Amino acid sequence: MKKYFQRLGRSLMLPVAVLPAAAILLGIGYWIDTGLGAGNPLAAFLTKAGGSLIDNIPILFAVGVALGMAKDKDGSSALSGLVAYLVITTLLSTATVAMFQGIDPTKVDPAFGKIGNAFVGMLSGLVAASMYNRFSHVQLPDAFAFFSGKRLVPIMSAVSMIVVSAILYFLWPVLYTGLVSFGEGISKLGAAGAGLYGFFNRLLIPTGLHHALNSVFWFDVAGINDIGNFWSGKGVKGTTGMYQAGFFPVMMFGLPAACLAMYHTAKDKNKKQVASLMLAAGFAAFLTGVTEPIEFSFMFVAPMLYVVHAVLTGISLAVAAFFHWTAGFGFSAGFIDFFLSSRLPLANMPYMLIVQGLVFAVIYYFVFRFLITKFNLMTPGREDDEADTDGEAANVSMDKSGKFANLAAQIYAGLGGDANVTSVDNCITRLRIEVKDMNAVDQNKIKATGVPGINIVGPTSIQVIVGTQVQFVADEIEKIRKK
């Protein structure tokens, strides 16, 4: 089950990755609108273009999850996700339910007015992927041969969603009410609720289940829709954005300061290598808000630090929410999104988040440095000395033309090559590999490439943390496997 949810989290990364485009369009549009006056045609064009993505997040989730969860990542699974979503949102729309019940549309349970949400999008994608994995290779009798294989998948997805729609016809109003109550319960806690959300958001990162929590607060599953409302200007100034703002001080300032602490506490002979890693990871966190290269560098080797990081994240969200400082992001809480969102109508005293960030940088640095030295935590550069495997250098040759090929070749060899690797996938920063025998994996050889870390998540599942350029490494490994 854990592995299943991790795959779901990875699949959500594809649709989430398009949100920066929406952020750029909306940010520039609102910037122009603010500077040149309301009603500017160019501003309207850009904001509508950005809204076309934000407003259709459920469809993006349906397509992305279907593609990501399908075993072959085939385009027919993505089409099936769209088919599944269209079936359920049509059958359970307010107008259709009114027709079923023979009542006026205004008297239909309001839950059906929210059926086109991120949860239903994910559900549609999961059903479509399941149908693809089950029916994509089925051969029908000759009379129906045209509909065999992948052509059968959208048909079975539609049929399945009719059944799902019948179930949700009775179940959705109950589920919706429960989700709304949960969201309202957190909302009523105000700043404390935002803090609790931030704490659990970080704690769930290792399992990938943070995406389920995010969908409640960031998207329109329970009526909060913090991201969509903030960027579309629909909400309350100083309140909408409270589940996003507190991440900026942590991702732009806190974690880069933690990188500095880990560099300063590394062994002298390892500082050059650690500096390279931490500089790149810290800059990525500051600029884009992508923090996995940092977090996975200490998450498992020093879990105490990670719990402290989760607590500090919760405190940051609570502080920002308490003072009503708000900013938003389309992708993650980095400088790009901060810059673009700071001029939006619902941004409230966003530059105070920079002041808060500077304070959190000091806190992160001294807390991390104290804990690392006090408890001798094995953060990067502090590990026990290990002999290099087969005399390999500590870093792979990084010449521009072949750096990814070289890195991929050495990682693949360390994993045991064709004889041991059964599947390779990736998320934003990690290679996710399934192997036959974990004992055949040479971790020293993989570490010798200079990757930020390795995470064994199951008897046959291993993750190699590469960084934001992981896609290029994954592509090179696929080339090796196809030879």
Image (cartoon, rainbow, N blue to C red):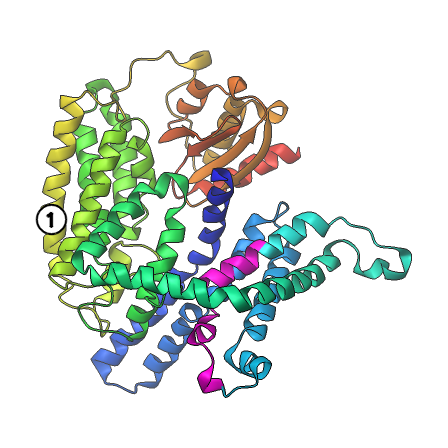
236 relative to 436 in the view: left or right: left
Q: Is residue 426 above or below residue 109?
A: above
Q: Name the residue: 28% across, 69% down.
A: 230
308 relative to 42 in the view: left or right: left
Q: Main secondary structure of the magenta part?
A: helix
Residue 7, given in percent of the width and then of the height, sits at 50, 44
Instruction: Confirm whether residue 482 shows in the render.
Output: yes
Residue 27, given in percent of the width and then of the height, sits at 30, 69
Q: Is residue 140 magenta?
A: no
Please state the extent of the stretch shown in magenta in the rendering: 105-126
Question: In the depicted view, which residue is nearer to us: 210 or 290?
Answer: 210
149 relative to 259 in the view: left or right: right
Give, as a three-letter code, the residue at label 1. Leu
Q: Is residue 278 above or below residue 127?
A: above
Q: Name the residue: 36% across, 70% down.
A: 25
Residue at the right extreme, as displayed: 142
